[in-house]
Amino acid sequence: MHILVTGGAGFIGSNFIFYLADHHPDWQITCLDKLTYAGNLETLDSVRNKAGFDFVRGDIADRDFVNDLFSQGHFDMVVNFAAESHVDRSIEDPSIFLKTNVLGTQVLMDACRRTGIRRFHQVGTDEVYGDLPLDRPDLFFTETTPLTASSPYSASKASADLLVMAYHRTYGLPVTISRCSNNYGPWQFPEKLIPLMIINALSDKALPVYGTGQNVRDWLYVEDHCKAIDLILTDGQDGEVYNIGGHNEKANLEVVKTILRQLNKSESLITFVGDRKGHDLRYAIDPAKISRELGWLPDTRFEDGIRRTIDWYMENRSWWEHIVSGNYRQYYEKMY
Ligand code: NAD
Ligand code: TDX
């Protein structure tokens, strides 16, 4: 089995590569990553010299480059993690989100059509379903919830999902899509809520909470997400969408207070700042389909996952200090 993992130098993609290396040691893995600000080669240090692992730097939206890569070797499966992933950045400038997330997905699927593929898997997000009201805890996103994206980021991810399903229906491309809730865990870039709050608290800096802090996210430990994708690759049905979520809903303020408590830091570090434009109120996934059809259930309770994550950021200071200082860019600019 030769698998192409795009975006594997980012948060979830790198965790997925580690998961594959542990659970499918005989698979050949090629990681394709552009190494944007969010991609970090240091993250892949533990696998980079292993037999059966290759790293290629490139852009999924660069058609010539992708065609070239696909003509050099045959991939049995492609898992597309590569994306611009931060909502706040998409509000500042949507352009690169459309290029990478929509056009990049098309370019990859065209290459798959040409060479043939056993499975193209698109890593999607629950944000494509818009949001749920805070006062209706009985409502959840299912796979048939209409797509109603709020931010340019989620609109780009919803567009990609539509394109993936269109390639299945029109060209018969064997595809699957997973839509998961907010991930947390090791190696997450410290622009996202949980790692940002951990490293700010460790540095006694202000913790910026948007609006009232009552917005709700459904937190999923990254390894549980990786396990779900692996199951979809092996047992999932072509043309199907699978929602992945851990029934782990928390208001942002609750998450921030939990982090402060665990680090023994004062709540006075919390600073309420202006709200995100178009800020989604609540995400909540109904994972019944993947549980019923593929037997997936999350293994990690939030209390354990957040403890493990905090410990990881405490034990891996140099990783995030390189990011914060910008030094990690020099590391790979020298090599590529
Ligand atoms: P990330 O920002 O940490 O990593 C993205 C990776 O993609 C980086 O390594 C970056 O260098 C690479 N990349 C960006 N543009 C590229 C391009 N044009 N060509 C090749 N590589 C490129 O993101 P993440 O949090 O790991 O998210 C991975 C995927 O999961 C994304 O598709 C995202 O939409 C989706 N997702 C993330 C979450 C979450 O909570 N983080 C939740 C649901 C879905
Ligand atoms: O400084 C902050 N303060 C704050 O209050 C940041 C960075 C975030 N927030 C709030 C906004 C959200 O309600 O915390 C919540 C989580 O924010 P993010 O970490 O930016 O995640 P979110 O916008 O929910 O999107 C994430 O989950 C879905 C990922 O970034 C997406 O890639 C994924 O698709």
Image (tube, grey):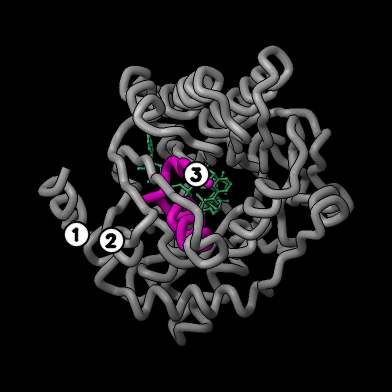
Q: Which residue is mark 1?
A: 325
Type of the residue with mark 2 = Asn
Which of the marked residues, 2 or 1, is nearer the chain's N terminus?
A: 2
Instruction: Name the element at disc 1.
Output: helix
Q: Is residue 132 above or below residue 184?
A: above
x%, y% of residue 194?
A: 49, 63
Visible residue check, residue 135: no
Task: Decide if residue 35 is on the left or right side of residue 292.
Answer: left
Residue 227 versus residue 84 in the image, above or below: below
Q: Are marks 3 and 2 in contact (CB under 8 Å)?
A: no
**Left or right, 272 with reference to 163:** left
Mark 3 is surrounded, within 10 Å at the Cα level, by few (under 14), some (14 to 19) or many (20 or more) other residues, namely many
Find residue 48 and report its horizontal and vertical position in percent.
30, 58
Toward the viewer: 80 or 201? 80
* Residues marked 1 and 3 touching at CB (< 8 Å): no
Q: Please say whether residue 10 is one of the residues in the magenta stretch.
A: yes
The question of residue 328 being in magenta is answered with no
Which residue is painted at 85% across and 52% down in the image? 288
Within 10 Å of disc 1 (Cα), the crowding (few <14, some 14-19, many 20+) is few
Residue in front for this viewpoint, 53 or 228: 53
> Few, some or many C-alpha atoms within 10 Å of disc 2 (few <14, some 14-19, many ≥20)?
few
Q: CA distance from mark 1 to mark 3?
A: 33 Å
Q: Which residues are magenta?
A: 1-20
Q: In the image, what residue type sits under mark 1?
A: Ser
Q: Which mark is residue 49?
A: 2
Residue under label 3: 3
- Examine the image and state in which quarter residue 220 appears: bottom right
Q: Residue furthest left?
A: 334
Identify residue type, mark 3: Ile
- At x 56%, y 64%, the residue is 23
